[in-house]
Amino acid sequence: MKMLRLLAAACFSLFIVDCNKSEPPPPAATEAPAAAASPAAAPSAAAAPTPAPVPEPTGPALKVAYSDWPGWIAWDIGIQKGWFKQAGVAVDFAWFEYAPSMDAFSAGKVDAVAVTNGDALVTGSSGGPSKCILVNDYSNGNDMIIAKPGIKSVADLKGKKIGVEVGLVDHLLLLKALESAKLTEKDVKITNVTTDQTPQALKSGSVDAIAAWQPNSGQALKDVPGSTAVFTSANAPGLIFDHLCVNPKSLAERRADWLKVVKVWFQIADFIKDPKNVDEAAKIMGQRVKLPGEEYKKFMSGTAFQDLAGNLKAFGKGETLESVFGSSKTVDAFFTKNKMYKKPVKFEEYFDPSLVEELSKAAK
């Protein structure tokens, strides 16, 4: 979604977040007090248990490229909380614009990248295959079809001009929207507009509706009073899954460490899903993109963060959008039709649920 969200991004800003440097050191282990020498002495209170030693990382830091999407910015919670160090794994998270993050992965500069299921297929088709080991989330409202005032439903789009970045994920969302109203592309006039320009296109009146993701969709609603989101990704949950996808060689060589990373993610997801932590989670995530926590909450509400149970469900084989396999089959057909790559890919080979399944068995 996000070349698919941000394919047009031309330059990136990169800085490294070193989980080991940003976290406080563990408390020093202390010895239990010696027993009193005198038998006449009163019994002492039970000594406090010695803190379990923090496991040492077993290799060099894993390098992960991530970018501006709530399901990926959420990694910052684990970084700030010190959970990677506690798990005994060193991870360097490198902040990119979305398209350059995929370029870095394809060039072998990082071990893993945060991408949509569709973009994993596109990257793989051009020589950067990966194994998606984790579902961070699926878009649950952040991607929208927004119409100008007076247009209140998808059916009202018939004969209208719609601005969308052709061939990208919200083009697919638009087709799903039209399908829901028994319309096709032939019933509307599609204009190719880069996603970052869609708010201006709607505001200027050059199009009657747009397809865009946050923050562009939210900006359009703000800029055009009376505009309406007539269809969102919440109407097609699972169409857009967001993942952590790993270089197959790194996964084979460092599987135990990647298992720790997946386990930390579930700690993060559980933290976000606990209502008492929402304010803190939003504050941490908002800091990454310089937004107040209260403002960032609206992006979180359009993101269905996936915990262990959600991952088990998403990784289940199926033909519907509830499964990453069913979703990816739909996306693969769309990309093939729109010539994002020359022929269909073996999308089943891009997903490895074994780490999730191992953690599930360990939790029982």
Image (cartoon, rainbow, N blue to C red):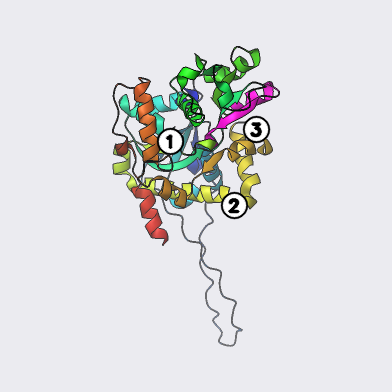
Which residue is disc 2 drawn over? 274
Spatial separation of the CA atoms under disc 1 and disc 2: 26 Å
- Whether residues under marks 2 and 3 lie with C-beta atoms below 8 angstroms apart, the answer is no
Residue 330 in view (yes/no)? yes
* Image marks 1 and 2: residues in contact by CB distance under 8 Å: no
On screen, residue 84 versus residue 357, left or right, reads right
Residue bearing mark 1: 64
- 3 vs 1, front mark: 3
**Residue in the picture at 38% in, 20% down:** 338
Res 325 → quadrant? top left
Residue type indicated by callout 3: Leu
**Identity, as a three-letter code, of the amino acid under mark 2:** Asp
Per the model, the C-alpha gap separating discs 3 and 1 is 23 Å
Q: Which residue is mark 3?
A: 291
Q: Residue furthest bottom?
A: 40
* Part of the protein shown in magenta: 216-234
In what element is the residue under mark 1?
A: strand
